[in-house]
Amino acid sequence: MDIPYIVDERPDTGLTNVKLGIWLFLASEVMLFGALFSSYVLLRLMAPEWPVGSEVLNVPMGTFNTAVLIGSSVTMVFAYASLQMDDLAGFKKFMGATIGLSLLFMVVKGFEYTHEFQIGNFPWTNTYLAIYFTMTGLHALHIIGGVIVNTYFLGPGSKMWATNKTQFTNRIEAAGLYWHFVDLVWIFLFPVLYLL
Amino acid sequence: MSENVQHHIAIYKKVAATLAVLTLLTVAVSYIDFAVPLAITVALLIAATKGSLVLSFFMHLLEEKKSVPLSRKGIGLIIGSLIITALFFLVIIFVPVMGHADKVGDYFAVPNANAPTVETPAAH
C-alpha cells in the first residue's frame, strides 16, 4: 500500500504528509536537544565552578566548523532550488558539496576530540566536559545520519527523478529541513559550549 | 516558477552572507570582557538572530503561513505544532532556572550520601 499524499497536498492540511511528518519529527528533536540544554543550565547553575569554554576548547576550530556547517546549509538550499529549476546536474553538484562539507565538519570534530583525549580531557573528567561530549556527540550522530540520507539521495535515490520529479523534490525538501535543523542546533551549541 | 526560484536564490545568498557576518560577530564579541550575564545575553541574542534567519528563509517557515487551506481559517499545522513545541521548550529550559531562583520558605540542605562522615564522640 502506498503512503497517501506524498506527491500532492492533502486538502484538509494543505500540506504533503512528507512535510508535516518531517516537521513533527523536528519538533520532537527540539525537545530532545531542549532537554540537554536544560540539563546544561541546571548543571552550570549548580556547579561551584565552571570553566570558560574558550580556555578549554579551540575557538578558531569551532568558528571554522560553524562556517562549514552554515556553508553546507547554503549548498543544501541550492540543491533544492536546482531541482525546482529542473536541473539535476546542478542538484548533484550542490548535494555533493553538502556531503563534502558535512564530512569536513566531522574531520575537524575528530581532530578536536582527539586533541581533548590526548591532553586527558575525557567525558568523565568534569561536568563541563561531560555535557560538552554528550551534546556535541549527539549532534555528530545527527550529522552522520544526514550524510547517510543525503548520500543515498545523491546516488541510488536520485533514480526517482526519472520517474517522479515532484516526489523526489519533496524528498529533498524534507532532507533539507532536517539538515537545516542540524545546522540550527550547532548555531546554539557553538556559543554555549565554546564561548561562554 | 523559475523566476520565483531565482528570487529565492537571491535571498539565500543574502542570508548566507548575514550568517557569516554574525558568526564572526559572535566570536569577536566573546573577546570583549563583558560581565557573565551580559555576555550570555549578547551571545544568545546573536544565536537567536542566526537561528531565526535559518528557520525563516532556509526552512521557508515564513511561507508556511500560507499553508492553511482557504476553506479553513486558522494557523497552519506546522506553525501550530511549532508554537506548542516552543511553549514546552521554554518550560524545560526555565525549570532549572526557577528551581535555582526559588528562595521561598526555609532552606533545607539535602543530606549527601557521599559527604565525609563527621566524627561524633562516642556517647557513654
Image (tube, coloured by chain):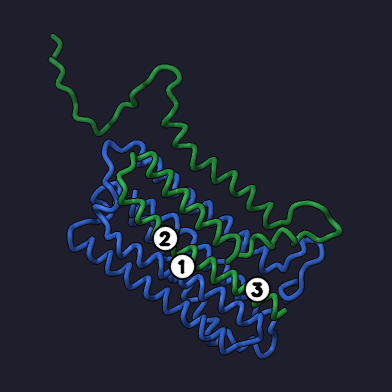
Q: Please report the residue visible at 55 percent of the width from the left and 81 percent of the height from the top.
A: A153
Dot 3: few (<14), some (14–19), or many (≥20) neighbours within 10 Å? Answer: few
Give percent across and percent down for residue B94. 49, 38
Number of marks in the rendered image: 3
> Which chain's residue wears label 2?
B
Residue A81, image quadrant: bottom right
User: Which numbered mark, 3 or 1, is in the foreground of this view?
Assistant: 3
- Inter-mark Cα distance, 1 to 2: 10 Å
| Chain letter for the residue marked with disc 1 in the picture | A
Q: What residue type is labelled 3?
A: His
Shown in green, the chain is B
Counting from the top left corner in percent of width and height, residue B62 is at 66, 60
Which residue does the numbered mark 3 point to in the structure image? B7
Question: Which x, y percent locates residue A190?
Answer: 39, 57
* Residue at disc 1, secondary structure: helix
Q: Which mark is residue B23?
A: 2
| Secondary structure of residue under mark 3 | helix
The residue under label 1 is A70
Image quarter of the N terminus of chain B: bottom right
Which residue is nearer to you in this view: B82 or A1? Answer: B82
Residue A42: % across, % down: 40, 40
Please name whichever residue, A23 or A77, is drawn nearer the observer in this view of the structure.
A77
Q: Quadrant of the C terminus of chain B?
A: top left
Q: How far apart are marks 3 and 2 (CA)?
A: 25 Å
Circle 1/circle 2 CB separation < 8 Å? yes
Q: Is residue A135 visible?
A: no
Disc 1: CA contacts within 10 A as few (<14), some (14-19) or many (>=20): many
Residue drawn 54% across and 68% down?
Answer: B14
Chain in blue colour: A
Nearer the observer, B49 or B71: B49
